[in-house]
C-alpha cells in the first residue's frame, strides 16, 4: 500500500457509553481518523496530529486543503513529521463534521439527529475520546502531539491531562487559554447569524433545507480573519476575483460542515484554560506563532513562555516570519519545518 492510499483512507473507531465532563453520557461515539506511515511492532513511533477548528483529518492528505493551511508539507515521507520513521494519526474531533460523532449524527436513543440536543463538550472530552481511540489501537505512549490552532488547544490539554503520555508537544498558532469573554462572544456571533436564517428552526434544520447561506457568510468572515486575502493576492489582482474566490472556498466548506458542529466546538472553548496546570506538563514543548496572525499574535509569547518556564516546563519558542497570518503553518511550512524536525529529533 502506498503512502498516498494510506493517507486518503478514512478509518473509524467506535466505543460505547462515553461519560462527558458535564456528567451526561453519549451512548455511542465514533471517531474517524487517518494515518500515514507504518506502526512499529512495539507501537512506540506514534505521532498524534490534532487538527484545527474547521478542518479535519484531511489536513494531512497529500494535496489536502484547509482554511488553517494544509499540513501535507509537514506530515509525510521525509517531512518534519517523517512518516518513514513515525506513524502519524490524525483523528477527527468529537463533535466535528468529518466522520466523528457530532450533532448531525443520529442519536440511537431517538432515531433523530442530535441537533441542538447534542451535549455540551469540552476540550478535555475531545482528548479523552482520543485517549480511548489510542487505547483501542494498543498505543500507550506517543512520541509527540503536534497541532495548529484548535489542534494546539488539544495538544496542550493532552499535556496537562495525560502528562506521561507523550515525550513532546508542538503547539502551533494557538494559546493555552481562550478568554471566556472571547469564547462567549464567538458563540453569540454564530448564534446571531444562524438564528436569523429562515431554515434555522431552533437548530433542527436538517429537514428544513439547511442553513447553507448562513454558513457561507460565517466561513467568509473566518477565512478573512485567517488571512486568505494575502494568499489569494499571490495569484489574483482584481478585488472582485478575490471576493469570488473567497466565496467559492467558503461554499465548498459550508456544504460539508454542520452548523451545530460549529456551535458545539465554539462552546467547548468557553472554559478552556490550562495555564494553572502548567506544572503538570512533563513533555518537552515547542510553541510556534506566526508574525501576522491576528487570532494568536506573537505578543502572546512574552506571556506564555515565562509562565511555562516558571512552572519548570522544558519549552522553546519559534516565531514564524510569514505574511500568511493564521494559515502560515501550512502555507509557509518550509519556514518552520526545520525547527519542528529538530524538535522531533530531540525527542529520541
Image (cartoon, rainbow, N blue to C red):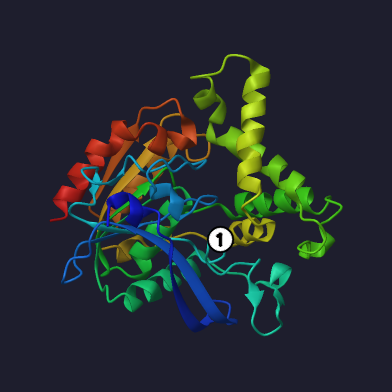
What residue is at 29 percent from the left and 41 percent from the top?
317
What residue is at 30 percent from the left and 32 percent from the top?
334
Residue 108 visible in the displayed image? yes
Q: Nearer the viewer, residue 31 or 10?
A: 10
Up/down of 82 relative to 229, above or below: below
Instruction: Give residue 223's position: percent from left, percent from top.
Output: 59, 37
Label 1 element class: loop
Residue 156 visible in the displayed image? no
| Residue at the farthest right position | 198
Instruction: Give residue 222's position: percent from left, percent from top.
Output: 61, 40
Q: Nearer the viewer, residue 224 or 67?
A: 67
Image quadrant in which the C terminus is located? bottom left
Q: Is residue 41 left or right of residue 172?
A: left
Up/down of 65 relative to 133, above or below: above
Up/down of 172 relative to 200, above or below: above
Instruction: Give residue 220's position: percent from left, percent from top.
Output: 65, 37
| Residue at the farthest left position | 348
Label 1 neighbour load within 10 Å: few <14, some 14-19, many 20+: many
Up/down of 100 relative to 301, above or below: below
Quadrant in the picture for residue 271:
bottom right
What residue is at 68 percent from the left and 60 percent from the top?
260
Quadrant in the picture for residue 155:
bottom left
Q: Is residue 330 left or right of residue 44?
A: right
Instruction: Give residue 105's position: percent from left, percent from top.
Output: 63, 70
How many numbered marks, from 0 up? 1
Image quadrant in which the N terminus is located? bottom left
The residue under label 1 is 96
| Residue at the farthest top position | 237
Amino acid at each position: 500500500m502506498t503512502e498516498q492510499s494510506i493517507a486518503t483512507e478514512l478509518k473509524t473507531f467506535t466505543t460505547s457509553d462515553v461519560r462527558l465532563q458535564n456528567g451526561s453520557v453519549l451512548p455511542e461515539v465514533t471517531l474517524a481518523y487517518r494515518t500515514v506511515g507504518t506502526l512499529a511492532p512495539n507501537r512506540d513511533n506514534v505521532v498524534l496530529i490534532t487538527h484545527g477548528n474547521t478542518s479535519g483529518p484531511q489536513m494531512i492528505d497529500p494535496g489536502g486543503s484547509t482554511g488553517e493551511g494544509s499540513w501535507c508539507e509537514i506530515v509525510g515521507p521525509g517531512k518534519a513529521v517523517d512518516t518513514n520513521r513515525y506513524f502519524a494519526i490524525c483523528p477527527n474531533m468529537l463533535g466535528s463534521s468529518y466522520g466523528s460523532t457530532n450533532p448531525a449524527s443520529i442519536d440511537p436513543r431517538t432515531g433523530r439527529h442530535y441537533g441542538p440536543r447534542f451535549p455540551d463538550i469540552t476540550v478535555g472530552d475531545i482528548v479523552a475520546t482520543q485517549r480511548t481511540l489510542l487505547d483501542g489501537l494498543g498505543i500507550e505512549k506517543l512520541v509527540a502531539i503536534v497541532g495548529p490552532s484548535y489542534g494546539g488547544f488539544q495538544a496542550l490539554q493532552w499535556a496537562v491531562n495525560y502528562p506521561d503520555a507523550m515525550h513532546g508537544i508542538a503547539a502551533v498558532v494557538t494559546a493555552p487559554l481562550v478568554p471566556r469573554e472571547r469564547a462567549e462572544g464567538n458563540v453569540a456571533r454564530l448564534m446571531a447569524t444562524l438564528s436569523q436564517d429562515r431554515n434555522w428552526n431552533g437548530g433542527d434544520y436538517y429537514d428544513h433545507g439547511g442553513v447553507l447561506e448562513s454558513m457561507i457568510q460565517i466561513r467568509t468572515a473566518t477565512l478573512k480573519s485567517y488571512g486568505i486575502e494575502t494568499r489569494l493576492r499571490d495569484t489574483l489582482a482584481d478585488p472582485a476575483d478575490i471576493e469570488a474566490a473567497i466565496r467559492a472556498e467558503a461554499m465548498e466548506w459550508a456544504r460539508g460542515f454542520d452548523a451545530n458542529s460549529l456551535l458545539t466546538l465554539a462552546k467547548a472553548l468557553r472554559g478552556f484554560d490550562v495555564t494553572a496546570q502548567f506544572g503538570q506538563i512533563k513533555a518537552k514543548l515547542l510553541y510556534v506563532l506566526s508574525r501576522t496572525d491576528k487570532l494568536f499574535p506573537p505578543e502572546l509569547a512574552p506571556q506564555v513562555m515565562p509562565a511555562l518556564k516558571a512552572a519548570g516546563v522544558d519549552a522553546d519558542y519559534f516565531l514564524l516570519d510569514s505574511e500568511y497570518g493564521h494559515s502560515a503553518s501550512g502555507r509557509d511550512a518550509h519556514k518552520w519545518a526545520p525547527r519542528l524536525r529538530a524538535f522531533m529529533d530531540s525527542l529520541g
